Image (spheres, rainbow, N blue to C red):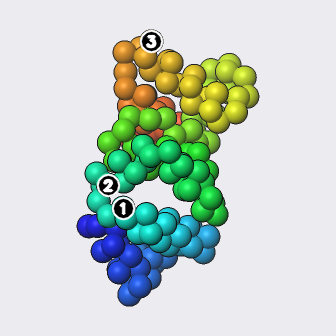
C-alpha cells in the first residue's frame, strides 16, 4: 500500500475501529502524519526512507502533534533502518540495570553503544529488550 492509498482509505474507513485505537489523538496523529507525507511527496517505503534522510524531515514530523523522537525513530525502523526507539519498556530495563535517568537522546546512544559492544544491530537489541520487558512472547 502507498501513502496516497492509505490516505484514500482513511477517507472511507474508520481507522479507530480498524486499528483498535481507543484514543482520538492517535487517529488524528495518523491522519496528520499521512497528510504531511503526501504533502512532502512521500508515497512509498523507499520514499519515506529517503525523505527521513533529508534535513528538516525529523523536525517536520516532530511538528505533528503527538509525534516525539520515539515515533520518528520507530518510523525509521519500519523502513529498514536499525534504530533504537526508546519507550517505557527500554527506560524500565535501563533503570533496572542501574543506568541513571537519562534523556531520550542519551539513552538511545547508550543502547546503540551497548549494541555495538555486543556485536548486535541497534534495532535488534531494542526489540529484544522490548519483548523481554513487555512480556510479549514470554511463557
Picture disc at residue 117: 3
- Is 114 rendered above or below residue 56? above
Extreme residue toward the bottom, this view: 12
Q: How far apart are marks 2 and 3 (CA)?
A: 32 Å
Q: Measuring 38% from the left and 76% from the top, which residue is drawn there?
A: 7
Give the x, y percent position of residue 60. 56, 56
Identify the mark nearer the N-term, 1 or 2: 1
Q: How far apart are marks 3 and 1 (CA)?
A: 35 Å
Q: How far apart are marks 1 and 2 (CA)?
A: 5 Å
Q: Measuring 45% from the left and 76% from the top, which residue is drawn there?
A: 15
Q: Measuring 41% from the left and 79% from the top, which residue is drawn there?
A: 10
Number of numbered discs visible in the structure rendering: 3
In which quadrant will I find the N terminus? bottom left
Picture disc at residue 42: 1
Identify the mark nearer the N-term, 2 or 3: 2
Q: Residues within 10 Å of mark 1 (few under 14, many from 20)?
A: many
Q: Nearer the viewer, residue 47 or 96?
A: 47
Q: How crowded is mark 2: few (under 14 residues within 10 Å), some or many (20 or more)?
A: some
Extreme residue toward the top, this view: 117
Extreme residue toward the left, this view: 1
Element type where label 3 sits in the image: helix
Look at discs 3 and 1 and give the one toward the viewer.
1
Q: Measuring 34% from the left and 67% from the top, which residue is drawn there?
A: 3
Identify the mark nearer the N-term, 3 or 1: 1
Q: Nearer the viewer, residue 123 or 93?
A: 123
Give the x, y percent position of residue 25. 61, 70
Q: Nearer the viewer, residue 26 or 127?
A: 26
Element type where label 2 sits in the image: helix
Cβ atoms at labels 1 and 2 below 8 Å apart:
yes
On the image, numbered disc 2 is attached to which residue? 47
Amino acid at each position: 500500500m502507498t501513502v496516497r492509498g492509505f490516505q484514500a482509505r482513511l477517507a472511507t474507513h474508520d481507522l479507530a475501529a480498524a486499528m483498535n485505537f481507543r484514543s482520538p489523538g492517535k487517529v488524528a496523529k495518523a491522519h496528520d502524519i499521512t497528510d504531511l507525507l503526501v504533502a512532502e511527496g512521500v508515497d512509498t517505503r523507499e520514499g519515506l526512507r529517503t525523505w527521513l534522510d533529508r534535513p528538516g524531515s525529523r523536525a517536520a514530523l516532530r511538528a505533528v502533534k503527538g509525534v516525539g523522537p520515539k515515533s520518528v525513530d520507530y518510523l525509521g525502523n519500519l523502513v529498514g533502518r536499525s534504530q533504537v526507539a526508546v519507550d517505557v519498556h527500554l527506560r524500565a530495563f535501563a533503570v533496572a540495570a542501574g543506568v541513571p535517568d537519562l534523556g531520550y537522546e542519551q539513552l538511545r546512544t547508550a543502547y546503540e553503544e551497548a549494541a555495538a559492544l555486543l556485536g548486535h544491530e541497534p534495532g535488534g537489541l531494542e526489540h529484544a529488550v522490548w519483548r523481554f520487558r513487555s512480556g510479549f512472547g514470554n511463557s
